[in-house]
Amino acid sequence: MARKKQIIIPIVILSVGVAAMIGFSSMRKPPEEKPKVDNTPIVAVENISVAPMTLEVSSYGIVKPKYETQLVAQVSGQIVELSDVFVRGGFVKKGELLARIDPSDYQAALIDAQATMATARAALETEVAQGKVAEREWKQITDSSPTELSLRKPQLAQELARVKAAQAAILRAERNLERTEIKAPYDAMIDSRDIGLGSFVTTGTRIGHVLGTAVAEVRLPVADNQLQFLVNKGEQANVHLNGVFAGKATQWQAQIARSEGVVDNKSRMSYLVAEINDPYRLQASNSDIAPIRFGSYVNAEIVGTQVARASVIPRYLVVDGKVALLDAESKLHYAPIDVIRQQGSNVIVANGLADGDQLIISALDYPIDGMKLALAGEETQQESSEEQSSETQVANNDSGE
């Protein structure tokens, strides 16, 4: 009996263990399948736009008058008259009287010169008559040729010289009388006045300073390597001047009139001179255009050459003359480009890109030409689709249970 127990008990224990193992095995869930990990690099892109472009060269300068004149007294005397417009900021026309020096002494000098002229003419006429009498008397005395002295020709030449001297004295007196009137040499704005009513001036005394209002100039410094982007090195090029008038941003139109033709010793810049006609809008019928005042600081954009097909891209994306593109098969492609100009943080490309090309703007760790890439937006959509598929599968399993 004891022997049977020794045989039965191990068999029972073994059977129970096998049954427990089978029960536990039936209760274990199969391992979940892990989703495949997509290691395709994700990139961001921008669409390339190719279009005609006009290149411009930036510069700056100060607006100044083309003509300015320091008025000085050419005769001496007391200031007896001043024009009401002869004040700083006043506008005057060409030939307009600004100030008058006492003309009394110069009027008297003119009368004196005219009297001297009358005396000289009378003496000349007398001498001419005496010469004729001398010639007639000589013929009555002898048939020989008369000498110049006998015909009083030296005396005639002397009287003629006195007449010419009197004429010069009259011209000098008239000119000095005219100089008593200080007039505007051209249409101008008064920059300063250095005299007052009753002041006594001598020859060379400063009267005032005037600025021509017909044409204004702006000297524009341009780096030598920027001249290549201008037609005919900038001659006759149009210029957009940008500044501020009465607190508002304003733009004026100008034109390059000339190049100074030298490189500045200090700045190593070439200078182009732009001109603006009628800067104070004194002749313009349209008063809506703001005047551009002397002394204003302006930024300039000089219109340059035309590029038929050009695009602008960030400069940091160009490596060894190439840029990274995402082709139609979502693969990396390096395209060689022709950079014609650097413009701040961007470059202007003339060749190598087409309208609609996708420029990769994000960094790649280990870029290889032809490698497969994915767009950031497409990756998000794929993840959303996978999540929706997973949720649908879970829901189906729950409903089956």
Image: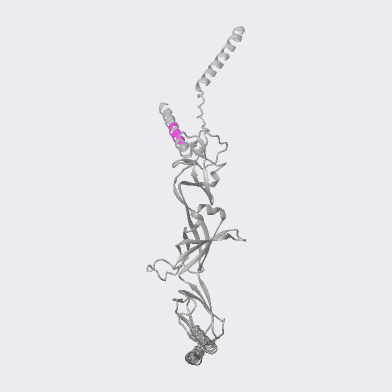
Tell me residue 182's x, y (percent): 49, 81
Q: Quadrant of the N terminus?
A: top right
Residue 149 in the image: above or below residue 22: below
Residue 289 in the image: above or below residue 207: above
- Residue 78 in view here: no
For the residue pair 359 and 121, the one nearer the viewer reads as: 121
Total numbered labels:
0
Tell me residue 174's x, y (percent): 49, 85
Tell me residue 287's x, y (percent): 39, 68
Residue 296 in the image: above or below residue 155: above
Q: What residue is shown at x 54% (from left), y 18% (from top)?
A: 21
Residue 187 falls in image quadrant: bottom left
Residue 268 within the segment the image draws in magenta = no
Which is the main secondary structure of the residues drawn in magenta?
Answer: helix
Q: What residue is shown at x 51% (from left), y 55% (from top)?
A: 233
Residue 109 in the image: above or below residue 370: below
Q: How is the image coloured?
A: one colour
Tell me residue 74's x, y (percent): 54, 82
Q: What residue is shown at x 42% (from left), y 69% (from top)?
A: 281
Q: What residue is shown at x 60% (from left), y 58% (from top)?
A: 268
Residue 385 within the segment the image draws in magenta = yes
Q: Quadrant of the C terminus?
A: top left
For the residue pair 282 and 270, the one nearer the viewer reads as: 270
Magenta extent? 382-389
- Residue 382 in view here: yes
Residue ranking furthest to the left: 285
